[in-house]
Image: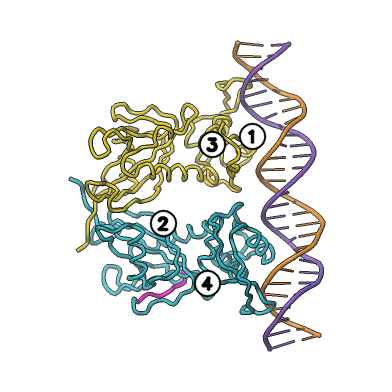
Chain colours: A yellow, B cyan, C purple, D orange
DNA sequence: TCAAAAGTGTTCCCGCTACACCCATGA
DNA sequence: TCATGGGTGTAGCGGGAACACTTTTGA
C-alpha cells in the first residue's frame, strides 16, 4: 500500500516597505503555536497543479488576488513531526511583491524580519530559506524589479538591493550597471522628482530574466545602511 | 477534509563516464510506459524524512548503497496527471556521483543523454531540470569534484566541466583557477601518470562549498570537445 | 543660492583570456 | 629523441570600485 500524505503549499511572500524587508504573515489564534506568526498556506486540492495551488493560496489565504507577485517554487519540507498534529508535507513557494497593502480581511500583515524571530512550525526556517533565495536571485536575475511598482527609478531599485542584501551600494556604479544591462530596464519616457533633487527617469521591467555578468553582493564587511 | 496524496522520491543521478554525461535509469517492463527509461524512485514511508527517503531509494532502488553520491533536493513535481494511474507528487532529488558500476541486480544502467530522448512519465523533464541544476552548480560551487574519484587530477576535473557544460576549456587557465581557489582542492602529495605525459598531482575535495568568484561557463559559440 | 539627488567621466586594479614557454614522464 | 600532457609566465582587455564632477530640480 502506498502511504498517502496531506500536502500543503506555504508562501514566503516578501516585500520591501519602510526601508525594511518584510514578510506577509498572520498571527495564529489557536493551538498549536497559538499567538505565533505563520506563513499563509493551504492544502492542495486533488485536481490542482502546484503553481495553481500557490496562486490560489496567494489569492484566498494571503489576500492578494491578482496582485503582480512573482511566484516560484522554493523547496519542499517533509520531516515527519514538523506539524505536531499530523504529518504534513509542505511545498514552499517564494513570492516577491511590490509594496502592496496587506489584506485586513484575511488578517495578514507585513512584518519586518526583526519581529519574526519566533514563528509557528518550521516557518522561520522556511522564511530564511526564502530570503536567502531572494538574495541570491538578485545577484544573477533581474527579479529585483519584482519588488518595485510598475514604474520605478534606478534609485528605488537600488534601495531594494540595499535592503535585501543589507549592504550599501555606490549609487553611480549601480546606475551604470543596471542601465547598461541589456533588457533589464525599459525607459518609460517619464520622470519623477518623488525622491527629491534632480528628476529621475522612470523605468519598467525589461524582458531579460538573467543578468550576465551577475551583480555580486559585496563582502559582509560593508554594513547595513 | 484534507486530501491525502501518495508522495514519491525520484532520483536524477548523474555521472561522467566514457566522456559523456550519463544518468542512472532502468527500463520499465510493464505499463504504463512499458519499455521506456525511468528514473529510480519510490514512495516515502510515513515516518521518514525526505533526505532519508532519498538515501533509501539510492541504496535500495538505485542499487548504490553507501556510495559517495552528493544528494540535494531538486524540485517537486505535482501536476495531477503526471502518472496516468493515480495522482502522485514527486519530490525529485539530484545526485552527483563518480563513475561507479551500475547495479545489475537492481537492473539499473548508466545511459548517455543522447539515448534518453524518450522516457516514462515526466522523467525527461525532471532529468533536464537536474542537468541544468548541475551545470549551474559547477559555476558557483565546488561540486564538480563530486563527479570525480576520491583522488583526482586537475585534468580529470576539467574534463568533468567540459563534458557537463559541453564546452572546451583552456587547460592552463582552468588549472590556475581551481588550484588558486581557497579550499577547493587539497593536495594528496601523490601524483599519477594515468593520463599520459608528465605526472599530474592528485588532489582530494577541499572543504569549500562555494566558489567566489564563480567560474562562468563560456558563451555557447564555443563547441563540444 | 543652496541642498539634494541624478547621472557622467576617469582612474585604478583585479581577474579572465590567450598564448608562449618550460617540465617530466613513457615509448 | 620525440610525443604527450602538466604546469608557469605574461601581456592585453574588460568590468568593477572609488570618487571627482556636472546637471536639474525644490525650497
Q: Which mark is residue B149?
A: 4
Gap between marks 4 and 3 measured at Cα: 40 Å
Residue tagged 1: A170
Tell me the subunit letter for badge 4: B
- Which residue lies under the disc numbered 3? A166
The Cα atoms of the two marked residues, 1 and 2, are separated by 36 Å
Tell me the chain of label 2.
B
Q: Which residue is mark 2?
A: B74
Circles 4 and 3: CB atoms closer than 8 Å: no
- As drawn, the label of residue B203 is none
Q: Are marks 1 and 2 on the same chain?
A: no
Percent position (x, y) of residue B164? 53, 65
- Quick check: do tags 2 and 4 share a chain? yes
Q: Is residue A128 visible?
A: yes
Where disc 2 sits, the SS reads: strand
Work out whether disc 4 and disc 3 sit on a shared chain. no
Q: What residue range appears in magenta?
A: B107-113
- Residues at marks 1 and 3, CA–CA distance in whole angstroms: 13 Å
Amino acid at each position: 500500500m502506498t502511504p498517502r500524505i496531506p500536502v500543503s503549499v506555504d508562501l514566503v511572500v516578501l516585500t520591501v516597505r519602510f526601508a525594511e524587508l518584510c514578510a506577509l504573515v498572520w498571527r495564529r489564534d489557536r493551538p498549536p503555536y497559538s499567538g505565533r506568526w505563520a506563513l499563509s498556506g493551504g492544502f492542495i486540492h486533488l485536481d490542482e497543479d502546484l503553481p495553481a495551488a500557490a496562486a490560489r493560496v496567494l489569492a484566498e489565504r494571503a489576500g492578494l488576488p491578482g496582485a503582480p507577485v512573482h511566484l516560484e517554487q522554493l523547496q519542499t519540507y517533509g520531516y515527519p513531526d514538523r506539524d505536531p498534529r499530523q504529518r504534513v508535507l509542505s511545498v514552499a513557494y517564494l513570492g516577491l511583491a511590490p509594496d502592496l497593502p496587506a489584506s485586513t480581511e484575511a488578517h495578514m500583515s507585513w512584518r519586518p524580519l526583526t519581529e519574526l524571530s519566533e514563528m509557528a512550525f518550521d516557518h522561520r526556517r522556511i522564511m530564511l530559506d526564502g530570503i536567502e533565495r531572494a538574495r541570491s536571485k538578485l545577484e544573477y536575475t533581474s527579479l529585483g524589479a519584482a519588488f518595485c511598482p510598475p514604474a520605478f527609478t534606478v534609485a528605488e531599485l537600488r534601495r531594494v538591493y540595499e535592503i535585501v542584501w543589507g549592504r550599501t551600494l555606490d549609487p553611480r556604479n549601480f546606475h551604470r550597471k543596471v542601465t547598461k544591462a541589456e533588457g533589464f530596464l525599459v525607459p518609460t519616457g517619464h520622470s519623477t522628482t518623488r525622491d527629491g533633487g534632480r528628476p529621475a527617469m522612470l523605468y519598467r521591467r525589461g524582458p531579460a530574466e538573467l543578468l550576465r555578468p551577475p551583480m555580486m553582493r559585496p563582502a559582509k564587511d560593508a554594513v547595513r545602511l
